[in-house]
Amino acid sequence: MTNLPISGDLVAQHNAARGEALQDDYDSLGRKLERSGIAIDAIKDRVKEWSVAVPSWGTGRGGTRFAKFAMGGEPTNIHEKLEDCAVIQQLGRSTPRVSPHFPWDKVDDYAGLAEEAAGLGLSFDAVNSNTFQDQPGQAHSYETGSLSSTSQATRQQAIEHNVECIEIGRKLGSRALTVWVGDGTNFPGQQDLGRSLDRYLESAAQVYSALPDDWTMLLEHKMFEPAFYSSVISDWGSSLIAAQELGERCRCLIDLGHHAPNVNIEQIVARLHHAGKLGGFHFNDSKYGDDDLDSGSIDPHQLFLVFNELVEAENNPRAGFDPAYMIDQSHNVTDPIESMLSSAEAIAGCYARASLVDRAALHEAQESNDVMLAFRTLRKAYETDVGPILAKARQEQGGAIDWLGAYRESRYRDRKAQERKPVELGAGIV
Ligand SMILES: [Mn+2]
C-alpha cells in the first residue's frame, strides 16, 4: 500500500478546478493533430508509458565550487530524499524510479529501503558509485585517480567500492551500475595519457566481471572537472573504446552537460546507437560548460533534436537498445522538487514532440534532398505546444494538471522545514 506525501484530496480538488479548461485545450489540439493524421490519444499514451529516473542527490540544493545556499526543509538522508522523490512522482507521474548514489545513500537495511520506496510508489534505477572524493576513514586517497590511479592499492579500493555498489543495487532491485570517475590530470606531463587509460580499463574490467548477467554497466564521460588538463574518460570516443573493450553489457551514458561547447550531441546519440552502445542519459542543460542547469531551460531545441534521434532509434532499434533515462542537474537557487518537476515535463515534452514528427515525410524529404521540407517537417513538430498532452497524461494517472500550483498549495516544503533538521552550510558541490 502506498502512502503518498501530498493529500490526494488536494490534488483532486486542484484538478477539478482545471479539468474543463484542459479538456477544451486537449480537444482543440486533438483536432489540429488529426488534420495531420495524428491521433492525440496515441501520443498521450506514449507519454504515459515514458519515464525518467530522478537522482537521489538532486533532491538537495546543489552548489558550485564556491558555495552552497541551503534551504529550509532540505532532505538530510536517503529516507527524506525518497519522500521528496515521491512528491515529484505523485504530482508529475513520469518519475517512478530513483537513482541512488553511494556511499551518500548508505543504510544498514537495503531490503527495508526497497520496501520503503515501494510504499512511496517508487523503485530504484541505476546505482552510482563514487570514487571522485575521499570518504572519512578511507585507506587510500583518490587525489591522483581511482580506477586509473598509479597506485595498485588505490585501484583495488576503487574496484571494491564499485563491486559493493553492485551488491547494494541487487538488494534494491537495480539493474545497472553507472561509473563516472573524476580521474585525470591538471598538468601536461603529470601522467602518461595512454597508460592511465590502460590502468582504467584493467580496473573497469574487474568491475565488469562482477556484473550480474542481467545488469548493464554504464560509462559516463566528462570532458573536464575535477581534472582541468585531461580526463581519462573525457569524451564519447574514449567512452566507446572502453565500452567496446569491456564487453557486451557495457554501454555509454551521455550526460548532456559533459561535452565541449557547441558539440553536436544528437549526432553522438546517432553514432553510439549505430555502435549498439547507447546505454543511457543524464539530462540537464548548460550554457558555458558543465553548468548542470535544469533540463530544457537553456536549449530546449537541442533536447528535442536528441529525442528526434531517440525516436528514430526506437523505430529502428539495434540489439540491446533500452537506454536508461535519468535527470542529473544541480539546483542552486530553486526548490529541487519544483526544478525536477519542471525538467521532467520538459523532457517528456521533447519526447512527445519527437513522436509527432511525420517520419515518412521526413525520410522522403531526406532521400530526395528536399532540404527545406526536411527541416520544416522537424520544425513543425518542435513548434507544437504539447502542454495539453502532458497535462492530460498527468491527470489520467492521478498527478496534478498544474503541478507547480498544486505543490505550492500543499505547503510541503514549509512543513518539512518544521520537521527536518537544517543542513549544514559551507559544502560546495554535492
Ligand atoms: Mn551525470
Image (cartoon, grey):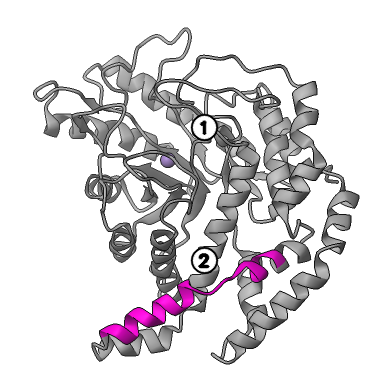
Magenta region: which residues? 371-391
Say whether residue 155 is visible: yes
* Disc 1 residue type (three-letter): Asn
Q: Which residue is mark 2?
A: 351
Q: Is residue 303 above or below residue 334?
A: below
Report the disc number at residue 250: none
x and y percent of residue 258 in the render? 33, 43
Dot 1 falls on a residue whose secondary structure is: loop
Classified by dominant secondary structure, the portion drawn in magenta counts as helix
10 Å crowding of disc 2: few (<14), some (14-19), many (20+): many
Q: Which residue is mark 1?
A: 332
Residue 15, by quadrant, is bottom right
Residue 140, by quadrant, is top left
* Disc 2 residue type (three-letter): Tyr
Dot 2 falls on a residue whose secondary structure is: helix
Q: Which of marks 1 and 2 precedes in the sequence? A: 1
Q: Is residue 171 above or below residue 268?
A: above
Q: Tell me if the residue at label 1 has its CB under 8 Å from ligand 1.
A: no
Q: What residue is at 27 percent from the left and 58 percent from the top? A: 264
407 left or right of 238? Answer: right
Q: What residue is at 52 percent from the left and 43 percent from the top? A: 126
